[in-house]
Image (cartoon, rainbow, N blue to C red):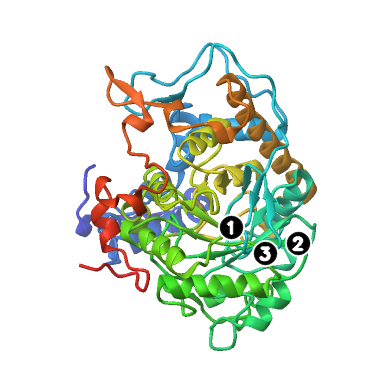
Amino acid sequence: MVRIPRWIAIPTLLAAIAFAAWWPPARWSLLLWSPLLLLALYDSLQSHHSLRRNYPLIARVRWLFEALRPFLYAYIVESPLDGRPFARAERSLVYARAKGDLDAHPFGTELDVYSDEYEWMGHSMAPAMDGDRGARVTVGTAQCSQPYSAALLNISAMSFGSLGANAIEALNLGAQMGNFYHDTGEGGLSAYHRMHGGDIVWELGSGYFGCRDDAGHFDPARFRDAAQADQVKMVEIKLSQGAKPGHGGVLPGAKVSAEIAATRGVPEGKDCISPAVHSAFSTPMEMLSWAAKLRELSGGKPVGIKLCVGQPHEIYAVMKAMIETGIRLDYIVVDGAEGGTGAAPVEFSNRVGMPLREGLILVRNALVGCGLKEEVRLAASGKVHSGAGLAINAALGADWSNAARAFMFSLGCVQSLQCNTDRCPTGIATQDPGRQRGLVVADKAARVHRFQAATVNALWDITCAMGLETPWQIMPHHLHERLNSARSDSINRIYNFYQRGVLLDDPDSVGCARYWNMARADSFRAAL
């Protein structure tokens, strides 16, 4: 691009304006061109942007294409296997199932079956007869007086505040229609969660929203009053999330509306802070004591934890605490580092936290190795969108799976990546009433229901093709993965899967021995 010297450009612009004002035939064009010429003059004199200063007016075209670039790529350039975090083909599958359209694919797979990323489930020459497709998972140890029967796919944690009211309503109505649960996220139990009667898992983060005192600490009385409602089926202690594990959060005061303030129990218009650490406990044993207290206050409902795995010894510390205290968690939800629905610091999204596969295997091994897997249920959350994803998680030890973004797609999300701007074009991740108007609750709730039912049905199809009666019979040796274009193996030959009780009987025989020895029931810190 040729740069015109400023000492030439400015006089030329002024001369053009003067000429247009003087010559009668050109005066009519003055109204059209003067604003552009004045804008170019401003660009050449301002000092904040080098490109605009050197290339007045023309440089603004760059910002236009920067703004259009994501849309041009998504609608013109992107192939079915492109797109992040979800490829177009993955999104299209969710859209088709949500709308009840044909979800079959013609002419064979488009995946490169010899790439290092390819994996597959081993089918049987003697497929099984159709099983009980309504089978569910019973969650609750002997210490739980109100166990819950969970579906194989449920709605993962998304808060009111991150999502708008219509989106929360549609998700909960869809959950009610399909008899699966809806996790509130840490933003509290809102009126929109309660409106349609869908099963609720109440997530408690470090802000204790909806059950906090004026100082931001846990309030047992407020928790008891809300948790004993019939609609609340389980309680989930959030330790961390995949998008930003170990990081707190702030909802700016400008976004804390009267509704959000009432839901969370915070002042309207003031910054709403989620600390990085809980104030109700500071050690594994204290956490279990608090979980037991929550179970009692809720009337005996299952209480579990959700976390993105970070340091392995901390998982073993929780196992040791359960063994030493005798207090059991009813379930553990493992969130992968690939998860996330809202805004998060880039460094945390990209480089902090363990991916779901490694995290799920580690927690599975910890439970099995300590002889606790029969009591404590294990769930997986992180980029699940298909029956194949459910089958893979089952092979790695998950009793059920949760999904967040896939359910957002079922609501109509187009992956515009505007979740952090309050300008979501589909009215899902926004508090703007005008944008939310586009999301019709009854229509989208039906889509949520259809997507969940079709995806679970696909899992059962895979299960029968493998010659198995239930998804809980899927084992690591059923899942195969490529190591390179010439070699592949079953997942149990790539990762270590522990035998029952090995951490109690012979911990030095397993690869995690150093982490097991570092773990302490009375502290999350390593014993070095």
Badge 2 is on which residue?
231
At a point 29% along the width and 51% down the height, the residue shown is: 507
Q: How many marks are shown on the rendered structure?
A: 3
Please give the label number shown on residue 301: 3
How far apart are the two marked residues, 3 and 2, measured between alpha carbons? 11 Å
Is 60 on the left or on the right of 444, as rendered? left
Badge 1 or badge 2: first in the primary sequence: 1
Is 199 on the left or on the right of 40, as rendered? right
Q: Where is residue 307 in the image (x, y as percent from the top left)?
A: 45, 58
Picture layout, residue 93 above or below residue 467: below
Q: Position of residue 69 (x, y in %)?
A: 42, 41
Q: Quadrant of the N terminus?
A: top left
Q: What residue type is labelled 1?
A: Met
At a point 54% along the width and 88% down the height, the residue shown is: 215
Q: Where is residue 117 in the image (x, y as percent from the top left)?
A: 36, 29
Q: Quadrant of residue 225?
A: bottom right
Crowd band around label 1 with a 10 angstrom C-alpha radius: few (<14), some (14–19), many (20+): many
Please give the label number shown on residue 406: none
At a point 62% along the width and 43% down the height, the residue shown is: 153
Picture layout, residue 503 above or below residue 303: above
Crowd band around label 2 with a 10 angstrom C-alpha radius: few (<14), some (14–19), many (20+): some
**Is any part of residue 263 visible from this angle?**
no
Label 1 secondary element:
loop
Picture layout, residue 402 above or below residue 484: below
Residues marked 3 and 2 touching at CB (< 8 Å):
no
From the viewer's side, name the closer residue of 352 and 421. 352
Label 3 secondary element:
loop
Badge 1 is on which residue?
158
Q: Which amino acid does label 2 sit on?
A: Gln
Q: Where is residue 140 in the image (x, y as percent from the top left)?
A: 63, 57
